[in-house]
Image (cartoon, rainbow, N blue to C red):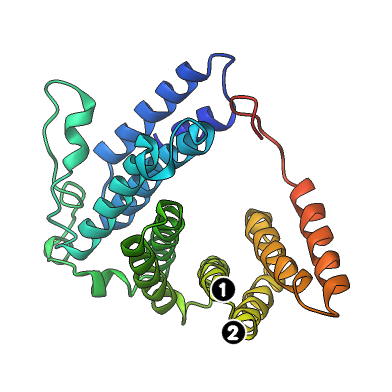
């Protein structure tokens, strides 16, 4: 269901409303039938990301803080974060009601249990021993940080700082390719706060580290994050006396990387 929801969004029909409706239904079903804490976390993250895409398409209609799609994205991501902190094997799927009359709540992770140990409670600390879960959780926190930055309130700024700190702690020791990408993403987002507070040296240190992590990752799935980090670094250097040339080079390299990605159009937007 997750793959079908994402695929329908990336390859839209001419009627955008039908594309969005179809994608949302698939992603809701993904949450409904998710098995285990990792799949539940990923499904909820995807559903929140769907509303984030809607927000990007509609963001000119309303102020960010009042935009229903942004609020919806944050709500799903925050629920996923709260579910992760709860007893991971006894989380009742609150999204079951979205699947229509007759849907019954299911207990995440219990239907497929094969032995007694599978039925034991798993805390967030237990789940975070799994490297794949670490990456999924860190990316969820980075999604929330990005959404909080759109809100622009003082409380959302503090929440952004809190979730980014948690994201960094979650993947700081993860040596997998996905873990390095998630760490680089978190470092890049933290650097933005330093840039906003005019702490350019600290921001450069974070961006240099993020660039280093990503330079060894050749997987095409991480091209977008490499480009985003390079753009952030380049924009910083362009504001730095005598480093403008280096900054412009990084911006150009980032644009070239983005051109290697397959372009999809949703609602006349790329």
Label 1 sits on a secondary structure element that is helix
Question: Relative to residue 255, is residue 29 drawn left or right?
Answer: left
In the picture shown, does residue 108 fall above or below 3?
A: below
Measuring 21% from the left and 65% from the top, which residue is drawn there? Answer: 85
Name the residue located 57 percent from the left edge and 32 percent from the top edge. 10
Q: Is residue 24 above or below residue 160?
A: above
Task: Name which residue lies at 33% across and 65% down.
Answer: 159
Q: Position of residue 113 (x, y in %)?
A: 18, 54
* Numbered label tally: 2
Asked whether the residues under the numbered discs 2 and 1 touch, taking CB atoms below 8 Å apart as contact, a structural biologist would say yes
Task: State the residue position of label 1.
Answer: 191
Q: Earlier in the sequence, mark 2 or mark 1?
A: 1
222 relative to 102 in the view: left or right: right
Q: Is residue 260 visible?
A: no
Q: CA distance from mark 2 to mark 1?
A: 7 Å
Residue 221 vertical position relative to residue 51 in the rendered view, above or below: below
The residue nearer to you, when weighing 43 against 259, is: 259
Q: Label 1: how many residues lie within 10 Å, few (<14), some (14-19) or many (20+)?
A: many
Quadrant in which the N terminus appears? top left
Secondary structure of the residue carrying numbered label 2: helix
Q: Which residue is mark 2?
A: 202
x 45%, y 25%: residue: 20
């Amino acid at each position: 269901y997750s793959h079908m929801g994402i695929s329908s969004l990336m390859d839209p029909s001419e009627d955008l409303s039908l594309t969005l409706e179809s994608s949302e239904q698939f992603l809701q079903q993904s949450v409904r039938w998710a098995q285990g804490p990792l799949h539940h976390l990923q499904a909820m993250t995807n559903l929140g990301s769907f509303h984030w895409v809607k927000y990007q398409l509609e963001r000119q209609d309303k102020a960010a803080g009042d935009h229903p799609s942004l609020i919806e994205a944050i709500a799903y991501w925050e629920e996923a974060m709260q579910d992760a902190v709860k007893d991971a094997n006894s989380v009742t799927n609150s999204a079951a009601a979205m699947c229509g009359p007759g849907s019954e709540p299911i207990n995440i992770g219990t239907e497929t249990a094969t032995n007694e140990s599978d039925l034991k409670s798993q805390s967030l600390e237990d789940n975070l021993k799994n490297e794949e879960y670490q990456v999924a959780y860190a990316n969820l926190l980075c999604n929330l940080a990005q959404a909080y930055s759109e809100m622009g309130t003082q409380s959302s700024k503090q929440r952004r700082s809190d979730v980014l700190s948690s994201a960094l702690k979650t993947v700081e020791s993860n040596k997998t390719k996905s873990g390095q990408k998630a760490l680089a993403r978190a470092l890049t987002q933290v650097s933005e706060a330093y840039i906003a507070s005019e702490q350019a040296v600290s921001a450069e240190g974070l961006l240099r580290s993020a660039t280093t992590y990503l330079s060894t990752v050749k997987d095409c799935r991480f091209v977008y994050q490499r480009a985003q980090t390079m753009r952030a670094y380049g924009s910083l250097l362009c504001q730095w006396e005598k480093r403008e040339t280096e900054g412009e080079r990084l911006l150009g390299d980032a644009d070239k990387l983005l051109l290697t990605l397959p372009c999809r159009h949703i609602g006349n937007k790329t």
